[in-house]
Amino acid sequence: MQIKKVFSLFDTINQKHTEGILKGKCFTSPLCKFNPLWNYNKQRGMQVRSFIQLVLVLLTSSYAGSALSGTSFNYYKDSRDYDTLGIVISANKLPHGFSVWGFTDFHSNQHTDKQQADFTRSFSEYRLTNSLISRWTNIDGIGLQAEYNDSTPGIDNTVWRLGFTYKHRFSDQHWVQLRALPLQDNQDSQASLIFSVSLHPRISLTGFADYNIRSGNENRWVIEPQLNLLMLENTWLLFELRYNEFEEHSPTSDGTGVAAGLRYDI
């Protein structure tokens, strides 16, 4: 019954958002401004985006009682004069060796001065991993991974990837993960490094480096190391270095910045 109510609410939001788009009012009405996931244009509805992300959230929420499942919210102020509001979900003990991790970030435009909380764009990344191959090969930490990316505004920004991941634990607080995703729904591919290092019981260093291999185009790096300071129970102070070569080569954005923020773990 609760799921039916959630879908009914999302249908209502989608309908109102579509009406706003058709009237040319996107990002001027509250529903459009704070709902960039349901991005429509006059010819084509993008309900598949909200459907995929809703399913992942519901899937994770159904396992919220697990000690290895969680949700967190974060808010950043970037040196390039824009804000980021994000949600991260994870569930590590799904049936048949599956796990889910993903996030959606809402951003305002860069250099917006007094409109830094006007969220007009978003980026989402969700990963579905299966660890059964680790049991079959007796190699701890290896798995198969499918990844879904999307960004708004725009109607053709979705990316699907498939490949392998390997996570090596030096201890419970220190680990490094390598990902190779050679299969993509276009001719591109990606390799990445993710890491987590505990510097103190209340201080950790985490981050990633994505190397995007682009067929017929110049390859691009996206790198974000982050310092995490536990201030209160479930509340973290964050300092992040951001480098994005896609933004670096865009005429409307800067690719390098630093951000400070807060994270609250549920």
Image (cartoon, helix red, strand yellow):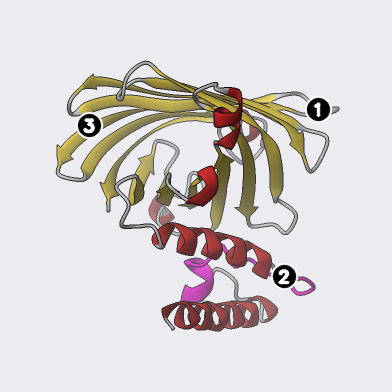
Q: Residue furthest left?
A: 232
Q: Residues within 10 Å of mark 3 (few under 14, many from 20)?
A: some
- The CA distance from mark 2 to mark 1 is 28 Å
The disc at residue 41 is 2
Q: Nearer the viewer, residue 45 or 90?
A: 90
Residue 223 as seen in the image, left or right of residue 233 = right
Quarter holding residue 237: top left
Q: Which residues are magenta?
A: 28-45
Quarter holding residue 249: top right
The disc at residue 229 is 3
Q: Residues within 10 Å of mark 2 (few under 14, many from 20)?
A: some
Q: Is residue 132 magenta?
A: no
- The CA distance from mark 3 to mark 1 is 39 Å
Q: Which residue is mark 1?
A: 217
Question: Could you tell me the amino acid type at mark 3?
Answer: Leu
Q: What residue lies at 76% left-to-right and 24% top-to-bottom?
A: 218
Secondary structure found at label 2: loop
Secondary structure found at label 3: strand
